[in-house]
Image (cartoon, rainbow, N blue to C red):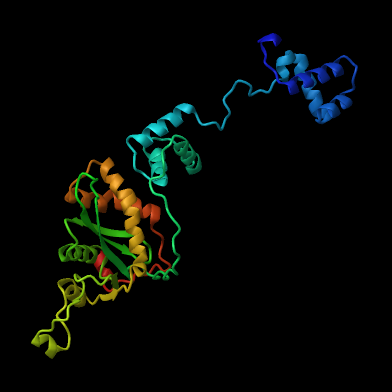
């Protein structure tokens, strides 16, 4: 490249002029360094480069090269295409995970959000100002307290009607333990969850739930036998909990069961999209998927170790 082919800035022209003055003896090396605002040692290096390579030696070495930290435009175009296509509907964090794990594209969340917003792709969910409630301290031991609840939602996309998902989490760890899809929230779904939990984990000490009629009698009718016994006959689920010696704790408000409510917020963000990507649209397949790969990945990302390693199970030996 000749000197005439170089496009140089005014600053570089000034540097060339000062270096030439020092090389022609019309300015000292020290004086030239002061004029350019550099050290004497750096001035000597600049003079050496000028002698060896001419004007080109004074042009920055990265001239004409892509900056090392500049994300390639091709990569950004692919990210935008994926966000509008295959991964449409994923929240920013979930999308960033898919890019790194499935597409081998590593972008910081900040960069990815900036790219998506600049492309006119809005955030999936805008979160408003939330009221803050004092959170109940977690149990120290795994199995000391489980929380379960059901959530009707269009889990298989807008084309299908709502299905109910009954899910169980551990209070100490926040780990997702089990989930069952059914047409509606019913006693059978909860009994299925309870049976599987007991077989896999043992008998928990307590279960936290709302005041749904599935769990407890909310009517005022008392039979003669119930009046003589001094208590109403429990529901099927209530009877099962009693026989297993599991303490039933009933929430007094939706905020009281905030952990399981937050679980369903996360599941509605992530599980719906994961089911779509896996091509699953039946409750049987969805239950298998939820309790297999999805649960394993979910717990790696969100579950936390219990404060105490000892199990809070009434029958922990059943885990063997």
Check the picture and name the quadrant holding the C terminus.
Answer: bottom left
From the top left corner, tell me how far across and down residue 216 is, in percent: 20, 75
Residue 77, placed above or below residue 185? above
From the top left corner, tell me how far across and down residue 173 is, in percent: 38, 63
Judging depth in this view, the residue of 212 and 49 nearest the camera is 212
Q: Residue at x 49, y 41 (%)?
A: 108
From the top left corner, tell me how far across and down residue 182 is, in percent: 17, 56
Horizontal side of 142 relative to 167 (left or right) equals right
How many numbered callouts?
Answer: 0
Horizontal side of 161 relative to 302 (left or right) equals left
Residue 173, placed above or below residue 6? below
Which image quarter: residue 45?
Answer: top right
Q: Residue at x 26, y 45 (%)?
A: 275
Q: Residue furthest left?
A: 224
From the top left corner, tell me how far across and down residue 41 is, in percent: 81, 28
Q: Is residue 205 visible?
A: no
Which image quarter: residue 217?
Answer: bottom left
Residue 227, placed above or below residue 43? below
Q: Residue furthest bottom?
A: 228
Horizontal side of 315 relative to 225 (left or right) equals right
Q: Residue at x 77, y 22 (%)?
A: 46
Q: Is residue 19 visible?
A: yes
Residue 94, placed above or below residue 192? above
Which image quarter: residue 254?
Answer: bottom left
Horizontal side of 119 relative to 27 (left or right) equals left
Check the picture and name the quadrant holding the N terminus.
Answer: top right
């Amino acid at each position: 490249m000749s000197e005439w082919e170089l496009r140089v800035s005014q600053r570089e022209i000034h540097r060339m002029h000062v270096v030439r003055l020092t090389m022609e003896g019309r300015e000292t090396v020290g004086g030239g360094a002061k004029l350019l605002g550099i050290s004497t040692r750096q001035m000597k290096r600049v003079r050496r480069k000028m002698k060896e390579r001419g004007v080109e030696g004074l042009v920055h070495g990265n001239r004409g090269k892509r900056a090392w930290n500049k994300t390639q435009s091709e990569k950004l175009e692919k990210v935008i295409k994926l966000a509008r296509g295959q991964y449409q509907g994923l929240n920013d964090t979930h999308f960033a995970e898919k890019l790194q794990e499935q597409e081998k594209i590593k972008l910081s969340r900040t960069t990815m959000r900036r790219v998506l917003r600049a492309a006119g792709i809005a955030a999936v969910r805008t979160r408003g100002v939330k009221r803050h409630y004092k959170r109940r301290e977690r149990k120290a031991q795994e199995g000391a307290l489980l929380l379960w609840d059901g959530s009707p939602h269009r889990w298989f996309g807008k084309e299908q009607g709502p299905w109910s998902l009954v899910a169980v989490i551990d209070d100490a760890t926040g780990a997702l333990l089990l989930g069952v899809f059914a047409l509606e929230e019913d006693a059978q779904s909860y009994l299925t969850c309870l049976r599987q939990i007991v077989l896999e984990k043992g008998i928990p000490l307590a279960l936290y739930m709302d005041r749904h009629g599935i769990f407890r009698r909310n009517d005022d009718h008392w039979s003669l036998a119930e009046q003589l016994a001094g208590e109403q006959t429990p529901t099927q689920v209530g009877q099962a909990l009693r026989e297993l010696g599991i303490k039933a704790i009933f929430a007094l408000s939706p905020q009281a069961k905030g952990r399981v409510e937050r679980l369903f917020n996360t599941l509605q963000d992530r599980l719906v999209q994961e089911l779509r990507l896996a091509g699953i649209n039946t409750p049987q397949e969805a239950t298998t998927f939820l309790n297999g790969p999805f649960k394993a990945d979910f717990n790696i990302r969100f579950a936390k170790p219990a404060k105490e390693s000892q199990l809070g199970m009434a029958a922990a030996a059943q885990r063997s």
